[in-house]
Image: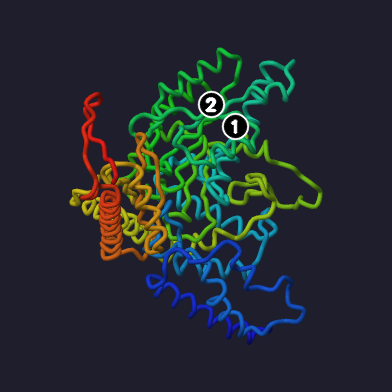
Amino acid sequence: MNSEEFRELGKQTIDYIANYIDTIRDRSVLPDVKPGYLHKLLPTEMPSTPDHWTQILPDVEQIIMPGVTHWHSPKFNAFYPTGSSYPSIIGEMLSAAIGCIGFSWITSPVCTELEVITLDWMAKAIGLPEYFLNSSDGPGGGIIQGSASEATLVALLVAKEKTVSQIKSLHPEWSESHIKGKLVAYASDQSNSSVEKSSLHASMKIRLLPSDINGSLRGDTLLQAINQDLKEGLIPSCVIATLGTTGTCAFDDLEEIGKVCKDKDVWLHVDAAYAGSACICPEYRFMLKGIHYVDSFDINPHKWLLVNFDCSTMWFRDTTALVNGFSVDRIYLKHEREKQNKYAPDYRHWQIPLGRRFRALKLWICMRLFGLSGLQSHIRNQCSLAKYFESLVGSDPLFEVVRPATLGLVCFRAKGEDSFNKKLLERLTKDRQIYMVAAQVDGKYVLRYAVCSRLTIASDVESAWKCISETARLLINQEEIHSNELYLETRPSLNDKLTISPKEDQVNIIGT
């Protein structure tokens, strides 16, 4: 493909993308395909000769799109939002065109320095303390990781190395393997599955502690667990606090947990993947109470700040333990410059992989083209739409709100048995006109309606509720019809004789 063909295909692709987003409501949110569908449509080997570029977009529509779950459709109400916007797409295109691998400053200075600046912008926007900024006088700073899962793993690994170093200084006779075998991490039983998975990768035992009635991990629960482990000779190393749990968007008590972590000298990491973005609105910064105790903090702009995946912003109070634990130098990675400085860190020492994409570019473009006011409006609008959905649920006697609308999430259910709610969700999923997932709240099976798409407006919320309520009533009618049919099949016929058993005093049906 030459530059002229690239221009032509690029223009057509931009048109295709814009048309796709403009008409995304017309598509079923879930695909109607079976596992292995693509293997029947594509050859078993790559083409021996080049296909013509004009074949690509038709094949995208005819072969690729049938297998797509449309995450940016207003009908997608599962999990949490995943960011997307035209500014971010432009940023992705430019990043791909530049194609740098910015593991060190010299490999592309702007890749590093723009990340330093945008992370400072974001930290200020969400109200983090100044010591988390790259430009602060202290050793703090921020970096873009791939996901909140990756950030949690990084936090666990840093806490692990820091704790081993501290214990080794107290007990030089202990081996590192002996110390590592005693380390323990803690999180809520409502924390994301990635927390437990990260503990496996970090080779650190984790205790998932019971949350309270509101789904929050409290300080006294953590303190009791830590004291118990200390008595058993274990070494508390890290606590993962969650602001905005996956199931119900609950918030661990950061203030209480932080006091315990400070007293016990335990690393405190905060996973605020979804909810943390809301802190760009001052009215939602209540969730940051206790932030002064935190060692590392992470949010996903690729969830709620209109930035395409992947872009997970992570900050450290002190990067010393991070750099000490992650630094591996080879001669081919060294480069000359005046001195290491806070505006030009070698980010390869702050992350698991060596290579890194120019992700700051799309974040920078989104910040410029939306501005703080635009991002705040987006958050507030989606929160108001969730409140609107909550009001629709509350006005229907068949349903109940299980948890008040929290940010962009509403947890609700049809009154009655779990089995009916399971059937309702299964039917909705089968019909492919709305996509939600379930959660377990107070032992009950509940449905989660999350406002995810940036395209969602009030009429989409109304359509979603109409679909849910009508499907529920349809299932009720079908169950009533089925029950009547069973009754008709088993009721006594006119030719049957009814007798009463004198011993059992019950009616027996005797067929003739």
Q: Is residue 384 visible?
A: no
Please tell me in which quadrant of the rendered image residue 204 appears: top right
Q: Position of residue 300 (x, y in %)?
A: 48, 51
Q: In the rendered structure, which amino acid carries the disc numbered 2?
A: Val
Q: Is residue 121 above or below residue 41?
A: above
What is the distance, in whole Å, between disc 2 and disc 1 at their CAs? Answer: 8 Å
10 Å crowding of disc 2: few (<14), some (14-19), many (20+): many
Q: Residue at x 65, y 33 (%)?
A: 203
Residue that sits furthest to the top in the current view: 231
Instruction: Tell me the SS state at disc 2.
Output: loop
Specify whether 289 is left or right of 268: left
Residue that sits furthest to the front in the current view: 512
Q: Is residue 270 above or below residue 25?
A: above
Screen quadrant of the N terminus: bottom right
Instruction: Tell me the SS state at disc 1.
Output: helix
Nearest the viewer among 169 and 220 is 220
10 Å crowding of disc 1: few (<14), some (14-19), many (20+): many
Residue that sits furthest to the right in the current view: 331
Q: Which mark is residue 79?
A: none
The answer to whether mark 2 and mark 1 are in CB contact below 8 A is: yes
Q: Is residue 214 visible?
A: yes
Mark 1, residue position: 159
Specify whether 392 is left or right of 456: left
Specify whether 266 is left or right of 333: left
Q: Residue at x 30, y 64 (%)?
A: 460
Mark 2, residue position: 266
Q: Is residue 238 above or below residue 457?
A: above
Please tell me in which quadrant of the rendered image residue 401 appears: top left
Q: Position of residue 74 (x, y in %)?
A: 37, 63
Nearest the viewer among 126 and 49 is 49
Nearest the viewer among 429 and 138 is 429
